[in-house]
Amino acid sequence: MDALHAISTLLKADPLRWRLLGLVRDLRLPDAWIGAGFIRNAVWDHLHGRTGSELLSDVDVIWFDPARPDPETDRSYEAFLRAAEPNVSWSVKNQARMHERNGDQPYSSSIDAMRYWPETATALAAQRSMTDACYIAAPLGTDDLMNLVLRPTPHFARNRMKDYHKRTQAKGWTSIWPRLTLVTG
């Protein structure tokens, strides 16, 4: 079984994650995905033999629409999602404006924006279709995620290694998932 199929199967088998993917799908936002720890944590828990992976952090919803860059639009979608699932810490961000905050060139899509995220194992997202298919976007591949490797993305390795080091220390992922290999340089 290839990695994308394995990740999709894992998400479909998790009732909470599958429901959350359905809530985001029902917003009908363009180029909308749930990414980052939503997938990474589920996979790393599975690879550590843990069942029933918890949501340890925000549920990061990304979407892309240059015509609606106002942060207030994101807040309205967060409010809708909080009303539908109040026990989840939702974070909704239109990637069409996030390059400004991050000091990058404009992104062309949600998937393009993921190339600029901090870690390769975090630069993944999932989307549930109207026909209940589960799509996985992995612009930097799945090898590091599936092999329990925590490595900076090429962008962070070139431009933001201090931020990467601070982030990996603050998150304490090697304590949560002790089989991780941390790439520090």
Image: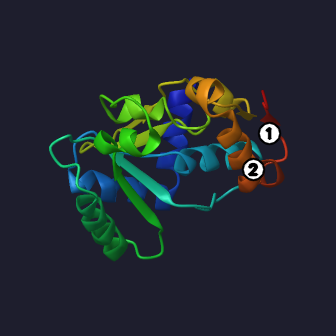
Residue type highlighted by circle 2: Trp
Mark sitting on residue 173:
2
SS state under label 2: helix
Question: From the viewer's perspective, is residue 72 above or below residue 104?
Answer: below
Q: Position of residue 32 (x, y in %)?
A: 31, 44
Q: Residue at x 24, y 45 (%)?
A: 130
Task: State the count of labels.
Answer: 2
Q: Residue furthest left?
A: 67
Q: Position of residue 112 (x, y in %)?
A: 39, 28
Camera sees residue 26: yes
Q: Residue at x 43, y 41 (%)?
A: 126
- Residue neighbourhood size for the residue with mark 2, other residues' Cα within 10 Å, grouped as few (<14), some (14–19), many (≥20): some
Q: Position of residue 97 (x, y in %)?
A: 31, 44
- Residue neighbourhood size for the residue with mark 1, other residues' Cα within 10 Å, grouped as few (<14), some (14–19), many (≥20): some
Query: In the image shown, does 95 or 50 lie closer to the viewer?
Result: 95
Residue 6 quadrant: top right
Q: Which residue is mark 1?
A: 180
